Amino acid sequence: MMHESRHFDGQVYLFNGDSHRFNVDRPLAAGSSWLDFYGITHAADSLHRVTVDGSDLGESDWLKVTVHRRGHPLLTFEQVPGAS
């Protein structure tokens, strides 16, 4: 995915989650500590990672994704509390 992200002329979004907490970051951007963790030598600045709450945490939150037709950023994310 890193190679494809670096060479794609646009933003790349990776959605993941299992037992994680909500987070939005750019793990392969220049200067990220994740580059060393994954052993990557070339940054992929266009890769955005969105991690959703994991079901095993008893969370009922959901992720609202808004697509913006104009402007930057293309997508925005909001963690929405679910019914308890």
Image: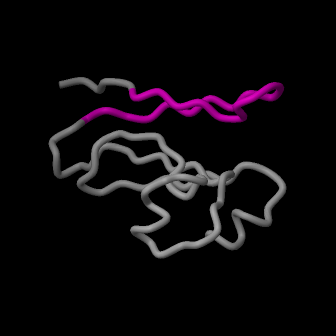
> For this view, does 40 lie left or right of residue 63?
right
Please state which of residues 30 and 2 is positioned toward the viewer in this rendering: 30
- Residue 16 part of the magenta segment: no
The residue lying at 41 percent from left, 47 percent from top is 51
Q: Quadrant of the C terminus?
A: top left
Task: Identify the colour scheme used.
Answer: one colour
In the image, the segment drawn in magenta is 60-79
Disc tally is 0
Up-down relation of residue 57 to residue 61 (above or below): below
Please state which of residues 17 and 31 is positioned toward the viewer in this rendering: 31
Up-down relation of residue 41 to residue 69 (above or below): below
| Residue 26 percent location from the top left of the image | 54, 48
| Residue 57 percent location from the top left of the image | 16, 45
| Residue 81 percent location from the top left of the image | 31, 24
The residue lying at 58 percent from left, 49 percent from top is 48
> For this view, does 38 lie left or right of residue 26?
left
> For this view, does 57 lie left or right of residue 67?
left
| Residue 3 percent location from the top left of the image | 69, 73
The residue lying at 72 percent from left, 49 percent from top is 11
Q: Quadrant of the N terminus?
A: bottom right
The residue lying at 59 percent from left, 72 percent from top is 41
